[in-house]
Image (spheres, helix red, strand yellow):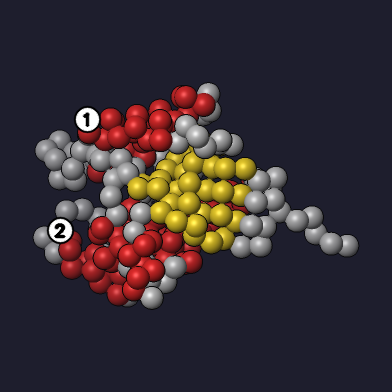
Amino acid sequence: MHEPSLARLDVLLVRHAASVPSGTPGWEERDDDRPLSEEGLRQADDLAFELDPWGLTAVYSSPYERALQTVAPVARRRGLGVQVLPDLRERRLTDGPRDDWPDVLARSWTDPSFAVDGAETGLAAQRRGIGVLDLLRARHADGGRLLVSSHGNLISLILQTFEPAVGLDFHLAMPNPAIYHLEHDGVGWRVMGGHGFVEIAKGN
């Protein structure tokens, strides 16, 4: 017997809007809880209007406050709840502030198996991110369009799975917010477009 075919599924993968900067006094030990800045809250409202033409089946988010706040206006306008998936959280590069953080970030992209103590390798984070896509594909076998809110490093690693040209420079150039359109055609995933892909195409 033939397995039933999967319907097309679209995912709008969104990096959160501008947040209170890392290292802001009062947030040093609560980085995961950092909210959007005033600018970021305005960006989240703008995003809701920008996505008005898109029909949405469901909204998912990282548990981090800045990711939740980014898609909250979209969900409210559609009368949808925001479903939290812990595996959409940002990749943890270090276990606290470090003076050599830029070097750690750079090495994490050149060596996917590298991680400082208490942190997550790029390879592990990438597998976690792809696992989320697999979960969403299984949940939405009948297709639809999903809005999924996450973080720059994890999103870059997810995109790299399908577009190997994605790397450190792509990650560092990703704006807040940023939107990437992924499609599963019933057989596999592909990146349909998003911030930075014109530049990647020029480099191939």
How far, Cα to Cα, is label 1 from label 2? 27 Å
- Residue 49 location, x and y as percent? 40, 30
> Is residue 97 something that shows in the picture?
yes
Under mark 1, the amino acid is Glu
> Is residue 88 something that shows in the picture?
no
State left or right for residue 2 relative to residue 14.
right
Residue toward you, 156 or 121: 156
Residue at position x 20%, y 38% from top? 20
- Residue 29 location, x and y as percent? 20, 43
Under mark 2, the amino acid is Arg
- Residue 27 location, x and y as percent? 19, 39
**Numbered tag placed on residue 38 in the rendering:** 1
Residue placed farthest to the right in the image?
A: 1
Answer above or below: position of 77 versus 33.
Answer: above
Neighbour tally class for label 2: few under 14, some 14-19, many 20 plus, Cα within 10 Å: few
Residue at mark 2: 98
Residue at position x 42%, y 71% from top? 164
Q: Helix, strand or loop at disc 2?
A: loop
Total marks placed: 2
For the C terminus, give its image quadrant: bottom left
Q: Quadrant of residue 34?
A: top left
Q: Helix, strand or loop at disc 1?
A: helix
Residue toward you, 23 or 165: 165
**Numbered tag placed on residue 123 in the rendering:** none
For the N terminus, give its image quadrant: bottom right
State left or right for residue 153 relative to residue 1.
left
